[in-house]
Image (cartoon, helix red, strand yellow):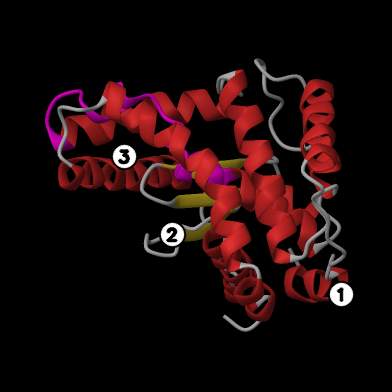
């Protein structure tokens, strides 16, 4: 990964420390609710649900066949993955072929963003903000663990993905999960040198969250940025425009 590597290397310890507190909450949740699953079995079930969820969205909206834009989204996404301390896990990025503004975090590292959502953004920093929020949902295990324990692997992938599909499509993620993902995304963006304040605009876009009003999310993001001294200057608008032209 060429861009941001120097910044990441210089700030690796800071990134890991900032991310650890968020990851710890997810690990506590996993231990408390899903102790019956071995790490290997849990991983298999997460991937199964994530793949099935991707297939469900692909069936509804289609996957955009634009290699330039898809490669660009994946490159930005992988930078976020590294900032989130998730480089030891496989993440997959794709663009949904719909003008509706949708972003998806699937268990197992399956991240989707729609063509319409990308078109509503104005810079690479804003794209990174959307992807950072979805990566945070995965890193923090923001899915009901009952989705992973309902029957066989095949049954789990089918029932779990359908339930998560409806939750995402209808904007019904829990408020605490949404707020936590926004906060984690602010840390990721700052560690990469992006301006974390772009999150304030980005939270107004996409599917409205019924349990986390946009104004409340914006206020919480501003507080996280101010209280933790998060900053960044990069927006990379020209590269964003060149890579997403024609969508």
Viewer-closest of 149 and 234: 234
In reply to whether residue 138 is colored magenta, the answer given is: yes
Q: Measure the C-alpha gap from mark 2 to mark 1.
A: 26 Å
SS for callout 3: helix
Dot 3 corresponds to which residue? 49
- N-terminal label among 2 and 1: 2
Residue at (20, 44) in percent of width and height = 39
Residue drawn at x 50%, y 23% as measured from the top left: 167
Q: Relative to residue 232, is residue 212 drawn left or right?
A: left
Question: In the rendered picture of this protein, how many numbered marks are placed on residues?
Answer: 3
Q: How far apart in space, not on screen, are marks 1 and 3 (Cα)?
A: 36 Å
The residue pinned by badge 1 equals 238
- Mark nearest the camera among 3 and 2 is 2
Q: Quadrant of residue 26?
A: top left
Residue receiving disc 2: 91
At horizontal 54% and vertical 66% (from top left) the residue drawn is 78
* Dot 1 crowding, Cα within 10 Å, few <14, some 14–19, many 20+: few
Q: Quadrant of the C terminus?
A: bottom right
Image quadrant in which you'd find residue 172: top right
Name the residue furthest top: 211
Sequence-wise, the earlier of marks 3 and 2 is 3
Kindly indicate the quadrant of the structure image that contains residue 202: top right
For the question of whether residue 60 can be seen, the reply is no
Q: Which residues are magenta?
A: 134-153
Closer to the eye: label 2 or 1: 2
Q: Position of residue 30 (x, y in %)?
A: 32, 31
Of 32 and 107, nearer the camera is 32
Give the structural element (helix, strand or loop) at label 1: helix
Q: Are the residues at dot 1 and dot 3 in contact (C-beta closer than 8 Å)?
A: no
């Amino acid at each position: 990964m060429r861009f941001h590597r120097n910044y990441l290397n210089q700030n690796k310890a800071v990134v890991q420390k900032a991310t650890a507190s968020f990851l710890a909450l997810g690990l506590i949740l996993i231990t408390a609710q899903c102790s019956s699953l071995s790490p290997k079995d849990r991983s298999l079930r997460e991937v199964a649900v994530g793949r099935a969820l991707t297939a469900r969205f692909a069936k509804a909206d289609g996957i955009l066949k634009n290699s330039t834009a898809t490669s660009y989204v994946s490159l930005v996404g992988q930078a976020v993955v590294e900032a989130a301390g998730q480089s030891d896990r496989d993440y997959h990025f794709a663009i949904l072929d719909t003008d509706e503004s949708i972003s998806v975090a699937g268990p197992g590292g399956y991240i989707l963003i729609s063509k319409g959502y990308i078109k509503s953004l104005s810079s690479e920093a804003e794209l990174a903000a959307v992807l950072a929020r979805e990566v945070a949902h995965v890193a923090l295990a923001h899915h009901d663990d009952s989705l992973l324990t309902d029957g066989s692997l095949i049954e789990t992938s089918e029932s779990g993905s359908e339930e998560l599909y409806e939750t995402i499509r209808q904007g019904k993620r829990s408020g605490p999960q949404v707020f936590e993902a926004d906060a984690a995304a602010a840390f990721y963006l700052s560690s990469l040198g992006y301006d974390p304040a772009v999150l304030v605009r980005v939270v107004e876009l996409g599917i409205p969250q019924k349990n986390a009003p946009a104004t409340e999310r914006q206020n919480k993001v501003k507080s996280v940025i101010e209280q933790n001294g998060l900053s960044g200057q990069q927006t990379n608008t020209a590269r964003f425009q060149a890579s997403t032209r024609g969508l």
